[in-house]
Amino acid sequence: MAINAQVSPVPSDSLDEAAAGRAAACLFRGMSDPSRVVILRHLLLGEHNVNELTKHLGLAQSTVSKHLTCLRDCGLVESRPVGRASVFSLTHPGAVLKVFAAAEELLAATGDAVVLCPNYGDGAPR
């Protein structure tokens, strides 16, 4: 399900807004953890195994594996066996890069508003 970002009006029969909204929300929830964002950004540089990602993130191997499982379940990463390890890569690196570029543009436009948001910002209850 794609989010239709056209400026011109779209006939209501060609877009299920509720389904598109749910799909986008699911994507953003899959990317909502800072560690998963760092993993995606690091995988933009190329393939990495869990050990490399663990060292880069400074997290436990089990935590990194859980994040990779989430990202794989969301269709954002894939793995292939190399010896006894698995090497992870992005399934759609160009699309991930575009999402990060758009996020950086929006963050620059909103300034500190997202970080200061009482519901989702740094000071929000978890």
Image (cartoon, rainbow, N blue to C red):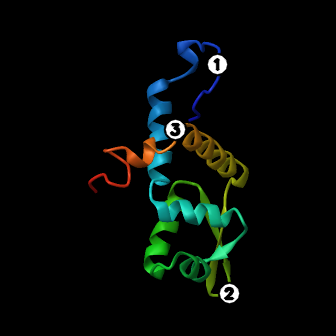
Cβ–Cβ under 8 Å for marks 2 and 3: no
Res. 7 mark: 1
Gap between marks 2 and 3, in whole Å? 46 Å
Give the image location of residue 74, x and y in percent.
52, 54
Secondary structure found at label 1: loop
Q: Residues within 10 Å of mark 2 (few under 14, many from 20)?
A: few
The residue lying toward the viewer, choosing from 71 and 83, is 71
Task: Residue at 59%, 34% (x, y): give it.
Answer: 2
Q: Amino acid at mark 3?
A: Thr
- Classify 12 as above or below 42: above
Q: Nearer the viewer, mark 2 or mark 1?
A: 1
Gap between marks 3 and 1, in whole Å? 21 Å
Task: Residue at 57%, 37% (x, y): give it.
Answer: 109
Res. 110 mark: 3
Task: Residue at 48%, 81% (x, y): give it.
Answer: 61
Give the image location of residue 64, x and y in percent.
49, 74
The residue lying toward the viewer, choosing from 66 and 81, is 66
Which of disc 3 and disc 2 is earlier in sequence?
A: 2
Q: Amino acid at mark 2?
A: Gly
Return the residue at label 2.
83
The residue sitting at the bottom extreme is 84
Quadrant of residue 18 in the image? top left
Q: Amino acid at mark 1?
A: Val
- Classify 56 as above or below 83: above
- Classify 95 as above or below 42: above
Give the image location of residue 29, x and y in percent.
44, 49
- Classify 101 as above or below 110: below
Residue 30 in view, yes or no: yes
Gap between marks 2 and 1, in whole Å? 49 Å
